[in-house]
Amino acid sequence: MPSSISNSNERIPPAPWGKLWLLTMSIVVVSVTGWECFWRSRGFVPSLTDDAQLWAAARTQVGRKDKDAVVLLGTSRMQLGLNVGEFARSTGIRPVQLAMNGELPIVPLRSLVDDPSFSGVIICELSEDWMSPETVGGKAAEWIQVYEHQTWSSRLEQWLGRLTQDTFVFRLPDLAPLRVWHHLLEGTAPTPSYVKVLPDRSILADYTKLDAADQRRHREEVVRESYARQPPWPPAEFRERAHELGELIEPLRARGGAVIFVRFPTSGTLWELQNQRYPRAQYWDVLGPETGAFTIHFKDYPELARFECPDGSHLDYRDAVPFTHALGGLVVDHLRAKASERSRSARAQSGAAAL
C-alpha cells in the first residue's frame, strides 16, 4: 500500500511560480511608484534626515582631505546661510559642513582642535551669547561618539540610507505610514516641509512655504523671555571667556591652522534685542583681540549686511547664494593675505639665516 506521505507532492498541482513572483513584484513596484508620484504631486521633494549618521559621514571627510581642509561649524544659521556647493563654485574650496542645528559649536570646535591630524581652517559661526568654552556633553558629544565608533558595515548602511532618502519622497519621516495614518484619523494631511537637507548637509529654506511673520514673532517672544530670565554676562566676564576661547584654539594655530569667527545676520527686532543686550564695543569687538582669530561681523560689510532674515534669524535659500559668495570672498581674501604674510616671513628668516 503506497504511503500517503510519499505521494503528497504528487497531489500538489504545478504552479507558475515565476509568473506569480513577477506579478507580486509588479504590484509592489506599481504601488510604490503610485505612492511616490502622489506625494510628489502634492509638493514633496526628497530630503535627507540631518542626524548623527549624516554628521558622522561628513566628519569622516575631514580625515580624507588634505591638512588644509576647511570646516564649517555653527548652528542652523550656518547650515541655512552658507551653501556648500555655491561656496565651492565661487572659491574653488569645498568645505565640510559640520554645523549642528540647535547646538553650540564649542564641543565640535574642541574636538577638531584636539585632533592632531587636522590643521586646516575652521569657519565658525558665533554669537555673543553662545560663547561658553566649558560647554560639554549634549547632542554634539553624542554625534562625535557616533563618528568615533563607526564600522565599515555602519558606513555602508548609512550610505544606502542616504541614497534612498535622496531619491524617494516616501522615505521622508513625515510620510511614514504611522504618521500618515495619524493625519487621516485627525482629518488632516501631511504638508511639505519648507526645508530640504542636501547630502553635503547644507539646508535650503524656502520661507514662502510658511508664515515667516508668525515664525519671527514667536522667535522674538522666545528671545525676550530668555533675556528676562537671565542677565547678560558682564563685559569683564565676556572678555575672560573670549581669552579662554583663544587658549582653546591655540593648539590648532600652532599646527598651522586657523579659526575664523563669523557673526551671521539677524534682522529686525531680533537684531535690536541682541545689539542692546551685547553692545559691540564691549562684546564682539573684543573677541578678535582676545582670541587672536580673524572675525567677520555681518554689519561691517555691506555685501553681508544687506540681507533680511524672513524669520529674523535665518536666510532664505535664495539669499543664501549671494551671501555665500560674499562671505567666501572675504574668507579667501583673508587666507591669501595670511599666506602672503607667511611667505614674506619665511623669506625674511631665510635671508637672515644666510647672513
Image (cartoon, helix red, strand yellow):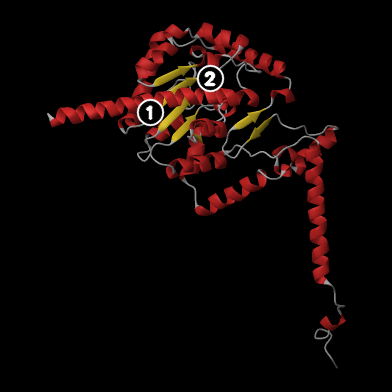
Classify residue 22 by image quadrant: bottom right
Residue at 71% in and 15% down: 213
Q: Amino acid at mark 2?
A: Phe
State the separation of the CA atoms marked 1 and 2.
19 Å
Name the N-terminal-most of marks 1 and 2: 1
**Element under label 1?**
strand
Label 1: few (<14), some (14–19) or many (≥20) C-alpha neighbours in 10 Å: many
Residue drawn at (23%, 29%) of the image: 347
Q: Quadrant of residue 259?
A: top left
- Residue that appears at 57% across and 27% down: 76
Q: Where residue 334 appears, x then y in whole percent? A: 41, 23
Tell me if residue 73 comes above or below residue 227 in the rendering: below
Residue 319, position as x, y percentages in the image: 62, 22
Q: Quadrant of the C terminus?
A: top left
Q: Is residue 186 above or below residue 1?
A: above
In the rendered image, which residue does mark 2 sit on?
264
Residue 96, given in percent of the width and then of the height, sits at 50, 36
Residue 134 visible? The answer is no
Q: How many marks?
A: 2
Q: Secondary structure at mark 2?
A: loop
Amino acid type of the residue tagged 1 in the rendering = Ala
Q: Which residue is mark 1?
A: 258
Q: Residue at x 33, y 26 (%)?
A: 340
Quarter where residue 168 is shown:
top right
Image height check: is 56 above or below 310? below
Left or right of 16 in this view: 342: left
